[in-house]
Image: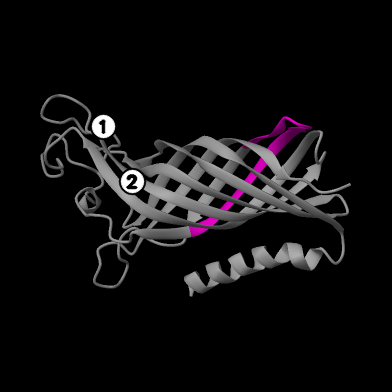
Amino acid sequence: MKVQKIIITIALLLLCCRVNAQIGEHRNTLSVGGNAGYILSSVSFVPTVKQGYHGGLTGGFSVRYTCEKYFSTICSIYGEVNYASIGWKQKIETADEEPVINSNGNVEEFSRTINYIQVPLMAHLAWGRETNGLNFFFRIGPQVGFYLSDSVHKNYDEPNIYSMDGRRGNVIVNQETMPVENKIEYGIAGGLGMEFSRPNLGHFLVEARYYFGLGNIYGNSKRDYFAKSNYNNIVLKVSYLFDITKTKK
């Protein structure tokens, strides 16, 4: 059912410009470029795993097709193809919320980095200057991620969950050794940002984006360990676009 909703959303995004073209001022501007940013990610596990944010980089190719200006709203379809490093970083604490110390006298650490090719496709709505100056924009749409690889960082051999002097308050440790089961993940992304444009120089964009995963990285049937294991990502991003085709005045 979730996959069907994603497909319907994509179809509506692709059709919106064509439908609106009968009402507002037509645009035909194709812009391409690149983007780079930083992702703060976590995974919502059920049973719960205490976490901080995992930091990782993202970057890739951007494309935007501006198709309509409806009153003061500039309407576009925006897409990206990105490489992204996401995952989770655990908070390993005792029942008293004190750090757990390993056999070497160091605070126990565990993080998992999972690398994806991510493809968001979003409606892009902007208000302000279209080609020379500043505008503010809002984006929302579906995103699909394709698993590439993963790696683990930890400074202990086995989870120290039973020793009397360092017992973990959270004894959920299965996620530390389980391989990623679902190689395709999907969800909804939405962002707010600003764009500065200059003729013959292009478009400079800054954005804060949130991604909510609808799929799980592990199986979630009754016989599986985790009932839920979906991503939550906060993305800070800068982009640059230049026009390939422009609307004829």
Task: Quote the CA–CA distance across marks 2 and 1.
Answer: 25 Å
Q: Is residue 193 highlighted in magenta?
A: yes
Which mark is first along the chain, 1 or 2? 1
Q: Looking at the image, which residue is at 54% across and 67% down?
A: 6
Q: Looking at the image, which residue is at 32% across and 61% down?
A: 182
Q: Is residue 233 highlighted in magenta?
A: no
Q: Where is residue 24 in the image (x, y as percent from the top left)?
A: 87, 59
Left or right placement of residue 34 versus residue 27 in this view: left
Relative height, residue 249 to residue 131 (above, below): below
Left or right placement of residue 19 versus residue 193 in this view: right
**Nearest to the observer: residue 206 or residue 15:** 15
Residue 99's disc number: 1
Neighbours of disc 2 within 10 Å: few (<14), some (14-19), many (20+): some
Label 1's element?
loop
Residue 114's disc number: 2
Cβ–Cβ below 8 Å for labels 2 and 1? no
Question: How many badges with numbers are in the image?
Answer: 2
Q: How is the image coloured?
A: one colour
- Which range of residues does the magenta coloring cover? 187-206
